[in-house]
Image (spheres, rainbow, N blue to C red):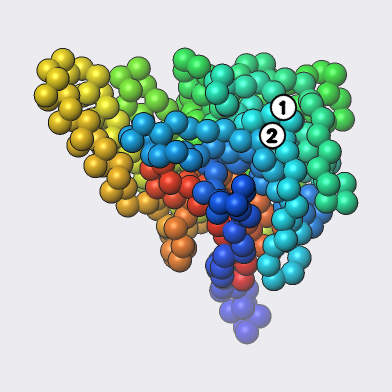
Amino acid sequence: MMMQLIACHPRHESKPAFQWKQFGVLPSSGGLASLGYAGPVTGIQGNMLFIGGGANFPNGMPWEGGKKQYYSEAYVTSINGTSPFFSAYSLPYKVAYSANCSTSEGIICAGGEADNGPSNLVLHIRLEKGVPVFSFLPSLPLALTNAAATAIGNNIYVAGGETRTAVSSRFFKLDLKDTLKGWQSLPDIPKPVSHAVLVSIGKEGKIFLAGGRKKTQTGISELYNHLFEYDIATNHWTAKQNLPYALSAGTGTIIENRYIALFGGDRGTTFHKAELLISAINKEHDTVRKQALIRQKNQVQITHPGFSNELLLYDINNDLWATSGRIPFNVPVTTTAVKDGSRIWIPSGEIKAGVRSPAILEATIR
């Protein structure tokens, strides 16, 4: 009878919890403290963390006339020890907002953008005794920025992103062991999307695409709360339980092959206010009213409250989302979370309109 009771009552499953701290701060450059970077190339190989490229506004915020600057500077540090020690290097070219993922063979940087717009270049970064060695892989079939990437074994997957004129619904795969085939087209994502999170479970052959957004012809973006699952075996996308709210430009990872963790992200309230005002500015012909709208838009951006600091957990087995507390830091967007064992790093990124963070956040999974 006791055995029957035990069998009838499932074991309580504790969800992962997270302990947060600041791992370190990017080093100064040219004698000036680092501003941090949006859209950096990030990845991990062995016990080494790589952070390179990205973009910021070194000479004033965009509403003050400051111009976005792109970078090729790169840094490598060991993840061992209590604080980072950075060695400085340089990427072969300036790039930000690339689709990044880490593999046992190195770090992949696909697409992105610089002064000339979106790129189709794909960079392979191998860390040999902590020193980056760069090589080029076959170019993407089209130039993309703000796409998302993940890896399963030797296969790299890239989803969505923005071209010069539109948001993409394309989905591609590259086999690192057979690069002569180039990028292979897979079934399109159910919706065109940029600024999404793409994660995968190699054991199950599943890829998940969470959130993101789509800029429309009106200039007003549609933010998504969708979660889609791609099954490698069936070559098919399936809609899963929606996120609790629309979210874009955040970061995420897979935990224990059971949970998707999403860290922060943009819920779009301030973003939409700014887009609506920009649309009104473009339509307004009266000089006085136009200037009033510009001042209003600038004030919205100046007083940007920052992005979500909530942590969302998706239980893959039960198709269920839940909030899992708050992150006790300014949580960046437009960067890529990297994971090694029970530790996760979120390097640099944007913490409010025009403002970057030089901090590298670290979470330990409990």
Specify whether 191 is left or right of 22.
Answer: left
Residue displayed at 57% across by 26% down? 114
Residue at the bottom extreme, as displayed: 2
Residue bearing mark 1: 122
**Does the residue at mark 2 contact the one at mark 1 (Cβ under 8 Å)?**
yes
Q: Is residue 104 above or below residue 190?
A: below
Q: Position of residue 55 (x, y in %)?
A: 54, 37
Local crowd at mark 1 within 10 Å, few (<14), some, or many (≥20)? many
Picture mark count: 2
114 and 243: which is toward the camera: 114
The residue carrying pointer 2 sits among few (fewer than 14), some (14 to 19) or many (20 or more) residues within 10 Å by Cα, namely: many
Q: Which mark is residue 109?
A: 2
Q: Amino acid at mark 2?
A: Cys
Mark found first going from the N terminus, 2 or 1: 2
- Between residues 170 and 330, which one lies in front from this camera angle? 330
Looking at the picture, how far across and down is residue 281, in whole percent? 22, 23
For numbered disc 2, what is the local secondary structure?
A: strand
Which amino acid, mark 1? Val
At mark 1, the secondary structure is strand
Residue at 61 percent of width and 19 percent of height: 143
